[in-house]
Amino acid sequence: MSFADLGLIPELLRAVEETGYTTPTPIQQQAIPVVLAGRDLLAAAQTGTGKTAGFTLPLLQRLHTQKPLHPGQRARIRALVLTPTRELASQVEESVKTYGKYLNLSSMVMFGGVNINPQTARLRQRLDILVATPGRLLDHAGQGTIDLGGVELLVLDEADRMLDMGFIRDIRRVLALLPKQRQNLLFSATFASEIRSLAHGLLDSPAEVSVTPPNTTVERIGQRVYPVDRDAKKALLEKLIIDGQWSQVLVFTRTKHGANRLAEGLDKAGIPAMAIHGNKSQSAREKALGEFKANRLRVLVATDIAARGIDIDSLPHVVNYELPNVPEDYVHRIGRTGRAGAGGEAVSLVCVDEHKLLADIERTIKLKIEKVVMPGFEPDPNAKPEPLRKPQQPRPPRQGQPRGHGQSNGQGQRPATQGKPGGQGQGQSRPTQPRSGNSSGNANGNSAGAGAGAPARRRRRPAPRPSGNV
């Protein structure tokens, strides 16, 4: 089957051909005709299956060939794509521009962690397609700078991750701003019960497609476990990278602090590395990702949320420096390699603390992963497990909680203080709570009283502890 067989118009076929793709993937073969027919869609597709093109191509065609469903006195946003993270939002909007280059349609990406004013100015101009994270979108809605009354096509991308991150309330608030008559597309890695519940209230007699059985790993990815003591993990990782001459490695840690510490340690050992996580500024995240994609950076250390939406062709190696607490996240992690038909290798460094996590993963993927003991790194048989520190998920805002003016953290959530855009600035501080309503946070997440009549002398506060947030 070719893309022409799917009923795409010549302008889109030309753009697809210029990208080098000739044959649609299974999710594209099933999803594109459904969307072109105007039906609602519930689609299950793992990362790396081509799902982004599966909805951007038919979305572009429908907007180009159909008259506006909700015409107004001025141009309105006709398509809204909601994503859980900034990186995924940027990736989707890049696909919209790539495939829509020969169509007279305009698009914009919107997320937190950056100045809100240029976004406000852009919203005053003609805009057909908006790709956004929930938090910043609701910031604009609260300030009255956005009109969603003309949306005729809604896409929820990676809906499972949005639910995991606590965005259900934000999603419902966005849905309340949209016209009832519209086409809805919901994409998820699995058809978990929470996803089906969301789909039941959102979709109207949807077509249902699934190209990957739930919670299975991509068969072409080679998986291996190295048993190792927790204190020897960094040395083993360095050996694997150097001896294997790995030139491009994506490494996952459980926490932001762990990502920073590992990246700094690798860099000092002569292995160029940078960390990417929610406390990094948007410019820092874009720089690290750009250097990594261009092969100028050997190792990118990431947390699960920050890595969502990273799309790198032919990424050869993924390393689980620490196993995730949720088995399904293991599937998402290793899916960063082995994309578009290419091979890849996923390595996990497992200490005694993580034996139960490994057993849960193997039970979920229905596969016993090969275990290899590296000479010189044999784990201590008498080692005792320590309790794992679980990463904290972002909390959804409470109902009725006032939102600020554009200081969301890029995953659609509000930061704890009004510090630097995109987080706490330093990335290794836990914000302390103000003692009164007249306090405001500084860039490091500490609060300082600002109320009139505050005592001149203040009690010293304990130093902030490292954050365990991802």
Image: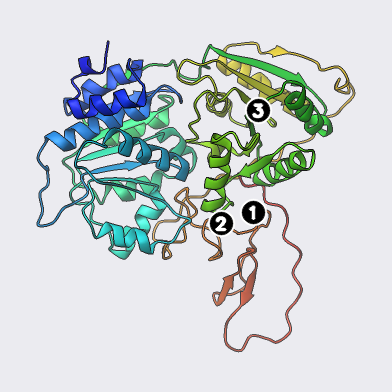
Say if mark 2 contacts mark 1, CB within 8 Å: yes
For the question of whether residue 42 can be seen, the reply is no
Indicate whether 69 appears above or below 459: above
Mark 3–mark 2 distance (CA, rounded to whole Å): 31 Å
Q: Residues within 10 Å of mark 2 (few under 14, many from 20)?
A: many
Q: Is residue 66 above or below residue 170?
A: above
Residue position for label 1 = 427
Q: Quadrant of the C terminus?
A: top right
Residue 358 in view, yes or no: yes
On screen, residue 256 above or below 120:
above
Asked whether the beta carbons under mark 1 and mark 3 sit within 8 Å of each other, the answer is no
Q: Position of residue 370 (x, y in %)?
A: 69, 11
Residue identifier under label 2:
423
Name which residue type carries label 3: Ser
Q: Which residue is mark 3?
A: 247
Image point 55% across, 23% down: which residue? Answer: 337
Residue drawn at x 23%, y 57% as measured from the top left:
125
Identify the image quadrant of residue 192: top left
Left or right: 43 with respect to 440? left
**x and y percentages locating residue 79 in the rendered image:** 24, 42
Q: Amino acid at mark 2?
A: Gly
x and y, in percent, of residue 313 in the image: 49, 26
Image coordinates of residue 406 in percent, x first then y, are: 42, 62
For residue 382, what is the image quadrant?
top right
Which is more toward the observer, 44 or 78? 78
Relative to 240, 159 lies left or right: left
Q: Amino acid at mark 1?
A: Gly
- Mark 3: secondary structure: loop
